[in-house]
Image (cartoon, rainbow, N blue to C red):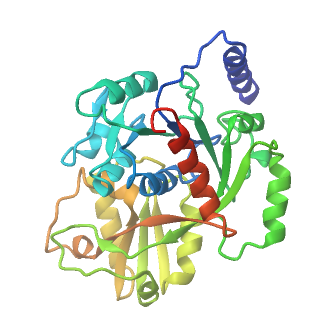
Amino acid sequence: MSWLYGLVVFVRNEMFNAGWLTSRSFPIPVINVGNLTVGGTGKTPHTEYLIRLLSDKYRVAVLSRGYGRKSSGYVLATKDMQPSMIGDEPWQMKQKFPDVYVAVDANRRRGIERLMNDAQTRDVQVILLDDAYQHRYVNAGLNILLVNWHRPIDKDYLLPVGRLRESFTGRDRADIVIVSKCPEDVQQIDLRMMQHNLQLRPFQHLFFSRFRYDTLRPFFEQSPAELIPINALKEYNVLMVSGIGCPSQMRTELTPLVKSIKTLNFPDHHSYTASNLKWAERLLSELPSPRIAVTTEKDAARLKDIAAYDGTSEFHRSIYVLPISVEILQDKQETFNKNITDYVRNYSRNS
């Protein structure tokens, strides 16, 4: 099945390379953030990094497919829109960056055209494509490829045997490659080995990044719970509730930061149910005090659809959201930022 899948992907890519299928460029800076694998590379935190970098100087828009949403076609997000209408990750970004345009459309060409031409959004100056590396009908001006440190693409296999959406050679389309989720204690020799294994072209820029966990906030605004600094987690027994691509890595990184940890994992983009919450409540009650439940910002979007605050429930009073930010390693943050800002600034529409 992997051979058959690989053949279909190969033929499709060759049709784009030969011009039989056409990629369209747009008169606006378009930055594509994607990967070769199915989930688990940290696309949303890296997209949020770009939003923070660019939004002070430019009108930024994020265009996503809106995975798992109940709507169809083009939808421009509003602050009070439900996660089910636009998908969990777009909802998360709209909540964190209300002044940024966030839209969803499976047809990225149409989505870009709407962002550029609709009266509400026509002042947009740069568009970030979330998870569109395989969407070759759009010719992005800058392609950023994310690679999970813990699952190198040179050692992975095509679906369904492995997690690759396309073969290792797909990395050649990237302008920037970021190896994400690097360990805290990563050594220079390990970075050089990863660089050697990726076999990048001379024109491609390579960076390494890792996640930083920020101050935890109560899931429910009505909860009397206070913020918990990340360095105070060592006092708590933690139940980690997640439906993300690589929960094992998050557990590994949280373990030294907490007193003890138990996990309740669901598939990526899981649609939570009331019974899932009851399961989480029971597991939390089994932990010794002091205890809290922790979930990701991505999971918080999906939990919002079914969870209503109940002041009598310990789980409702004790569930926290763990924000994630990205750090560029090797003192190359300024270099990375310059690559991005130079592309946007030098683009004809903004120059």
Which x, y percent locates residue 312? 14, 74
Q: Would you say 212 lies left or right of 198 here?
A: left
Q: From this viewpoint, is residue 151 visible?
A: no
Q: Position of residue 94 (x, y in %)?
A: 30, 49
Q: Position of residue 152 (x, y in %)?
A: 74, 52
Question: Relative to residue 134, is residue 154 drawn left or right?
Answer: right
| Viewer-nearest residue: 207 or 227 | 207
Q: Nearer the viewer, residue 111 or 239?
A: 111
296 vs 333, left or right, is left
Q: Quadrant of residue 125?
A: top left
98 relative position to 148: left or right: left
Q: Is residue 65 above or below residue 220?
A: above
Count of numbered tags? 0
The residue positioned farthest toward the top in the image shown? 20
- Farthest residue to the front: give it: 351
Residue 299 found in image quarter: bottom left
* Residue 334 vs residue 84, the one in the foreground: 334
Vertical comparison of 161 with 260: above or below:
above
Residue displayed at 72% across by 53% down? 206
Residue 203 appearing in the image: yes
Quarter of the image containing the N terminus?
Answer: top right
Image coordinates for residue 30, horizontal then vertical, percent: 50, 35
State the residue in front, 268 or 200: 200
In percent of the image, x 45 and y 64: which residue is there? 264
